[in-house]
Structures are given as C-alpha cells and as structure tokens.
Image (cartoon, rainbow, N blue to C red):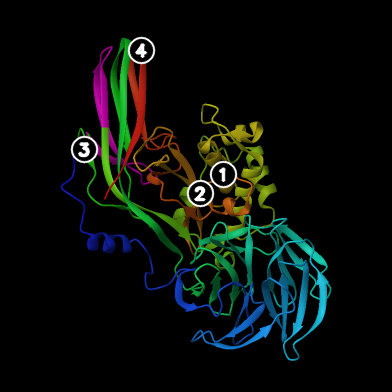
Amino acid sequence: MKRLFPGILPAFSLALLFSLLLPGSACAYTGEVSEELAAPCSYATGLTWDGEFLWVCDWKEGRAFKVDPASGETVSFEELPCLRPQDIAFADGHLFICSGYEPFIYKLDLSSGTVVETFPTPESAPSALAWDGTHLWLADSGTDLLYKLNPVDGTTLEYFKAPAGQTEGLAWDGRYLWAADRTRDELYMLDSRDGTVLMVMKSPGPYPTGLVFDGKWLWNVDFQDDVLYRLSYDDGENVYVTEANNRQVTLVHQLTNMGPGTVTEASVFLALPEDSFPGQCLLESIVFEPEPARFDTDQWGQRVAVYEFKDLAPGDSREVSYTARARIGERRFCIFPHKVGRLEDIPSSVMKRYVADGSRYRISQPLIAETAKQVVGDEKNPYWMARKICQWVQDHVEYERVGGWDIAETLIKRGTGSCSEYSFLYIALCRAAGLPARFEGSVVVRGDDACIDDVFHRWCEVYLPGYGWIPVDPSGGDRPLPADQAKSFGMLGNRFFITTHGGGDSEYMGWNYNYNSRLAYKGKVEVVADAFALWEPLE
C-alpha cells in the first residue's frame, strides 16, 4: 500500500495527545477500578455491606465471609441456612439470603445465627438481592425481571424488565439501583421507578456477580478471577474513552456525466472531520487529492473542503478524496440525572442556534408541537425530557430505508424511517420542547478492520447543562432490551469516524453529511454521483 504520510507519531506522543482530549484527567470515572483485593473464597456469588465490613457469600461452601475493606482480610464467617447461596443483603443486623437451589429468601439474625423469617421468591430462579433501606430487590434469571419486595413476607410491590439476560448482582446507592450482568460482563445504573438503564459500563472482571455500594465506593466481586474490585463512583469525570485504536479512512466522491448534455458547473463539498472532542484524535494532517479550491465554514461551524469544476462533457468524471489517520475510541458519558442542570442554565448562544426551526423539522406545525408536549408532559429535567423523547421515537418508529429523507411529520404518520429520519424526528421534538439538539454524521467500520462503507450513519446530540453535548442514536438504540436502548444515549462506539456536526439547511452541506454536491447544466444530463469510504487498520 502506498503510504500517504511519513509515519505515525511516537507512542508517547499519541498517549499525550489523546489524553488532552479527556477533561479533568485527574478525576476518576464511575466504574474505574481504584483497588483490587483477593476474594476470601473461590466461588463468590454475593456481596453486601454492613456499614463497616464487606460480606462475601460462597456458593459452594454456603458461607458468608466478613471482610475488612481496607486490607481484604477475613474477620469471621457465618454459616448460611441454605444450599447454593446466590446473593446476600444486610439490613439491621440481619442477612437476607436468596438461594439458587430453592426459591426462598431467608432472614438470618447475625447475633444469634438463627433464621427468623423464610418466605418464597416470586419465581423459581432468584439470582441477586439488595436492600434499599426499606425494601428488598430481587433479580430472577428465569424471568429476567427485577422485583421490589416487601421485606416482611416477600410480597411483590413492583417489577420490571432486567437490563439484559443474566443479572447476578444488585446494589442500592441511596438514589439508584445497580445491576451486574454476568453474560455481558456489564454493570448498569437503573432508575428504580421503571428500570430505565441510565449508565452502562464494562465490568472489571470476566464474570461479575455480587455488587454493593458502601457510601463512597461501588464494590463488585468476580466469580472467575476471585477478586473484590473497588470502583470509583461519581468522582468528577463525566466522559471517558476506552478501546481506542488507530485507523486510516479515505473518503472518495465521484461525479460522472452520462450526457447527453454538458454539466457547466459542479461543486463538491467534503465535510472535514475534527478532533476537538473525546474519542477522536487526528494523528496527522489530512491529505487531499486533489487539493480543494478553498476551505470554508457553514453557519453550524462545520468546516468544508470546496471543489469547483466546469464544463463536464458527456463521459467526463471528477473524483475528489481525502485520507485521514485517526485514533478512534469508544466514548462513554457518566450522567447522573439528578445532577443535570435546568434549561435556564443552557448558554443563550446554544439555545438560539439549536432550538431554531429547520425545513425538515417544522417544529411549529401542530403535529410536531402537540407530540412534543404529549411526550414531555410536565417534565422539567432536560435529561428526562431527552430520554422520554428518545423512548417515544423508538416505540413509534421502525427502521426502514425507504428512499428520501422525509420531514419529521411524515415519519410520525408513516411509522418507518432511516437513521437520518429518526434523527430529524428526534431533533424536531427536542427543539419543539425547548431542548437544544443537532446531528452528527460519520463513516462507519462495517465488520472487518479493513472494509468499505457506502451506507454511512447519522445520529443526534442533545445539550445537557452540566454535561454539554451528549450523543443520542435513536435508530441505533431501537432494540428490545433496556441495556441496548441505553447504549444509544451517552455512548458512542469506536466504529464511527465523525465528519459532520450540523443542524440542516447548511449553505454547503444542505441536509447531507460527509459530502454534498451541486450542479448546473445545459440540455438533458444524467449525472452519476457515488461516494464511499475505505477503512484500513494502522499498526
């Protein structure tokens, strides 16, 4: 392969450059490992906190080990009253235990070592247990449901769908419910009202089970590597990047005049990628072929390379391209809904630009205005406004590439649309509700590291005061499981090379992203426009 660049920057320079994109690097992000302790047993499945010590239950031995969180040393242990204990929860001098062998919850008095209550679980496969100060929470791996229980007799008070398929750890942090899924190796922060997944993070180990919050730290015990992980919790880092790799992207745009007339003027615009945000870092200057006539910027701040051609006779073609080398990582936001500011806290410059109308939004039209009002209701928290709108779009639209990019009203009426149409509808409803929103566009890795993309992808960003611009992908998150829906809000994978930030009606890009073209011609002409991206991995 011909190298267009003299070489990649040294590794230490890359690390420094990429770290500069992470605000507050001295802070830790939620879920970051701050300490590792050896588990007191070899088959740890459950974890709880008594206000001073950790308790770890062993599935095979049927014991709960009392552990000093500072040293990891075992202080004592307690024999449990059942076979195969799955999880434990501490409350007022008692341990609640759920068993993987029998569908019961046992209440053990630690002062006497006697069982003082026994009641059945709602279903037959209890897998995790937590105490929220008033109620018990139980996960069942057979139904994939989470239950809120009366601790006196186990009566079900509420229940909702678990984030994914195999919940084996539950915890309460004083405001939110947490769950650990062992098949996906992920930890989730949940709204305890309905199970909405608010945050998704990779588990520190390969088989996460017990989970507990001690008032400052989140703890997770791993069944496979026998480690107690102490995890940072809301330590100030709002966004972090993982799984970064280096890639080369070549975006190609071709115009061919099939005749019989003449194209008198042709303009091609290539949206220029930036690296002013976490998760995307240009390693070298972009190389253009040929050099553009000029560079310019539209009303959204989007930089474009402008090409201008004249007199394309029948059979003539023009090809333009750029090649970029970048380090691209998975971006994750740590958003705590109660810490999101008010709409009034959003800068006036952002409100003025990104709550404005557009020709594909038509936010003043009755159908858009009334739908936004119906969806948002009396909600004032910008986070929940954004989540409600996203959920509504996903509930009412099915993905289908039906051709053109229709306006938001048409999507509501038809009920199907492409990623761009999902984005137009989401932005329209956000703006109609007074919430700033815009779109992002990218080229996409399609399966292999070396691949071709000629489909591309568009999603949204919403502005949350206190956090800034947050990625929201309504079409990408249109899936049945809560965990997958949550990954479309505040997360962006390392498959996307972002080229475009826009709001539509751009003087250069129009409603396109990645590229656009305009023509003037004499006579009848047929112009074939083609565009694609070539991906290659970099060592």
Give the residue number, with chain letter if any, for mark 3.
1
Give the residue number, with chain letter if any, for mark 1.
426
Mark-to-mark CA distance, 2 and 1: 8 Å
Three-letter amino acid code of the residue under disc 4: Val
- State which tag comes first along the sequence, 3 or 4: 3
For the record, the magenta segment spans: 293-320
Q: Residues within 10 Å of mark 3 (few under 14, many from 20)?
A: few
Residue 386 seen: no
Mark-to-mark CA distance, 4 and 1: 37 Å
Image location of residue 469, percent across then percent down:
46, 55
Q: Nearer the viewer, mark 3 or mark 4?
A: 3
Q: CB of mark 1 within 8 Å of CB of mark 3? A: no
The secondary element bearing badge 4 is classed as strand
- Asked if residue 312 lies in the magenta stretch, the reply is yes
Image location of residue 528, percent across then percent down:
36, 20
- State which tag comes first along the sequence, 1 or 3: 3
Give the residue number, with chain letter if any, for mark 4.
525
Mark-to-mark CA distance, 3 and 4: 37 Å
The secondary element bearing badge 3 is classed as loop
Q: Residue furthest front?
A: 61
Residue at the image position 23 percent from the left and 50 percent from the top: 284
Nearer-the-camera pick, 244 or 429: 244
- State which tag comes first along the sequence, 2 or 1: 1
Nearer-the-camera pick, 329 or 126: 126
Give the image quarter of residue 527. top left
Q: Residues within 10 Å of mark 2 (few under 14, many from 20)?
A: many
Residue at the image position 64 percent from the left and 34 percent from the top: 415
- State which tag comes first along the sequence, 3 or 2: 3
Labelled disc at residue 437: 2
